Image (cartoon, rainbow, N blue to C red):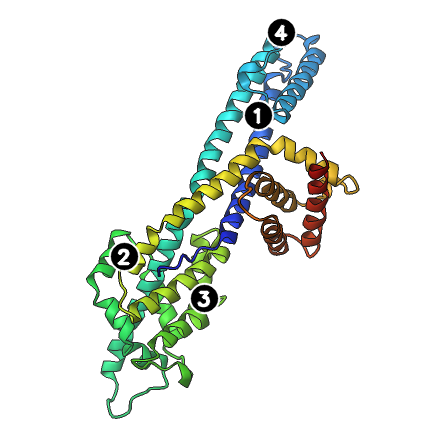
């Protein structure tokens, strides 16, 4: 498992996912602050004099406009002043304080998310290994009750019961300790894995090419992973409920599991630990945080660049995902000079095809080409 299994595209996608969540949260915080400003100037027919109604409405309108302008220009709270109306100034400063604090918490969460994703991948992998061990043990029990003169070699349960890699995993105290230390267990729903076993493992007939021998045990486990565990269905749904980004993460988990199986086959048990401490984790986390920081610091500038390059389009009709992909691409192209232009552009075009519409790839390509030509001519 010496080879680092996390592709750079995964890092870019994580940045996109979290930038999307951050952008939505930003809009929510802004709207909440505006609603609070409106409350500060709501006319109360019981407490306020009748002649205050129009004044309150006007003050409310001015305060909301000032707040929105301050947010749009990223004006620091301490620099905001409105001496013409002290109540408006106090209201806007107070809500700017709330808005900035809320965004600060979101930024911290977003910047920690890559390491959180690493932890999620790790725990998902351990959960699936524990699942395989449980199925192996039940299969051993069933095999022990069968007539030894009539071995059901065609059944998956029979193959699982004699799988040497799962036996090695089950008897490896270091692995079992690792699973226990990470509080990985199915005890919250003990009947879940048993139901899956009865539904998917017990009745299954294993293709001859995948039947376990000392030489093709890896193939058997690959078959279980790909044909049963990672298929769309109830098992996939359980993992998706526990992990918001499971559809993205499961590609990586599947790749890791196959490497774990191969690692057991070659007896290289320390490679698993080395992988999770691989120096590239820190490098990818740094790249992830760098992308997000650049976009957040240059958001107004990138908005203007995208707006100028998309004058033919109705700005409100441009997909948020497309706009965020453009911002990440600009951050990488303009600030990460160590990455070849062509590599960056192709990566974001492919990501746009995954997360946008059928036209998103062409749209991203065209807009980036226009912006970069403008930058070169400056």
Q: Report, in whole angstroms, how far the alpha carbon at label 4 lies from the one at label 3.
A: 63 Å
Binning the other alpha carbons within 10 Å of mark 4 as few (below 14), some (14 to 19) or many (20 upward) gives few
| Residue 191 shows up from this direction | no
Q: Report, in whole angstroms, how far the alpha carbon at label 1 lies from the one at label 4.
A: 21 Å
Give the mark nearest the N terminus, 2 or 4.
4
Q: Residue 220's x, y, as percent?
A: 37, 76
What residue is shown at x 55% (from left), y 45% (from top)? 16
Q: Could you tell me if the residues under marks 1 and 2 are in contact, i.e. CB atoms within 8 Å? A: no
* Residue occupying the far bottom of the picture: 149
Q: Residue 291's x, y, as percent?
A: 52, 40
Residue picked out by circle 3: 230
Q: In front: 169, or 265?
A: 265
Q: Is residue 300 left or right of residue 273?
A: right
- Mark number for residue 33? 1
| Residue 2 shows up from this direction | yes
Residue picked out by circle 2: 179
Q: Residue 51's x, y, as percent?
A: 71, 8
What residue is shown at x 61% (from left), y 48% (from top)? 341
Q: Report, in whole angstroms, how far the alpha carbon at label 2 lies from the one at label 3.
A: 21 Å
Q: Report, in whole angstroms, how far the alpha carbon at label 3 lies from the one at label 1.
A: 44 Å
Which quadrant of the rendered structure holds the N terminus?
Answer: bottom left
Residue picked out by circle 4: 83
Q: Residue 28's x, y, as percent?
A: 57, 34
* Residue occupying the far right of the picture: 312
Q: Is residue 29 left or right of residue 229?
A: right
Q: In front: 240, or 361?
A: 361
Q: Report, in whole angstroms, how far the alpha carbon at label 2 lies from the one at label 4.
A: 62 Å
Q: In front: 109, or 342?
A: 342
Give the mark nearest the N terminus, 1 or 4.
1
Give the mark nearest the N terminus, 1 or 2.
1
């Amino acid at each position: 498992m010496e080879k680092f299994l996390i592709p750079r595209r995964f890092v870019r996608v994580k940045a996109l996912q979290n930038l999307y969540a951050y952008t939505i949260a930003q809009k929510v915080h802004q709207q909440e602050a505006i609603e609070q400003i409106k409350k500060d100037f709501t006319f109360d027919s019981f407490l306020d004099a009748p002649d205050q109604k129009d004044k309150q409405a006007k003050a409310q309108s001015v305060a909301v406009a000032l707040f929105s302008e301050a947010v749009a220009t990223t004006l620091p709270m301490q620099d905001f002043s409105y001496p013409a109306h002290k109540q408006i100034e106090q209201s806007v400063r107070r809500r700017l304080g709330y808005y900035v604090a809320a965004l600060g918490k979101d930024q911290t969460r977003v910047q920690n998310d890559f390491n959180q994703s690493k932890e999620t991948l790790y725990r998902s992998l351990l959960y699936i290994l524990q699942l395989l061990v449980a199925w192996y043990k039940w299969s051993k029990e069933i095999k022990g009750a069968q007539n030894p003169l009539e071995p059901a070699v065609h059944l998956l349960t029979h193959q699982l019961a004699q799988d040497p890699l799962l036996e090695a995993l089950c008897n490896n105290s270091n692995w079992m300790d690792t699973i226990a230390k990470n509080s990985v267990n199915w005890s919250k729903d003990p009947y879940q894995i048993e139901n899956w076993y009865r539904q998917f493992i017990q009745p299954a007939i294993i293709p001859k090419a995948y039947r376990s021998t000392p030489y093709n045990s890896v193939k058997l486990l690959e078959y279980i992973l790909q044909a049963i565990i990672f298929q769309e269905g109830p098992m996939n749904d359980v993992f998706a409920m526990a992990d918001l980004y499971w559809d993205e993460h499961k590609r990586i988990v599947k790749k890791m599991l196959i490497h774990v199986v191969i690692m057991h086959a070659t007896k290289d048990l320390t490679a698993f630990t080395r992988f999770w401490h691989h120096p590239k984790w820190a490098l990818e986390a740094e790249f992830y945080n760098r992308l997000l920081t650049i976009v957040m610091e240059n958001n107004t500038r990138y908005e203007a660049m995208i707006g100028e390059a998309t004058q033919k389009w109705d700005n409100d009709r441009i997909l948020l995902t497309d706009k965020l992909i453009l911002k990440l691409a600009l951050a990488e192209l303009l600030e990460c000079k160590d990455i070849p232009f062509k590599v960056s552009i192709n990566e974001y075009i492919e990501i746009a095809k995954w997360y946008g519409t059928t036209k998103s790839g062409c749209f991203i390509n065209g807009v980036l080409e226009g912006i970069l030509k403008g930058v070169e001519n400056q």
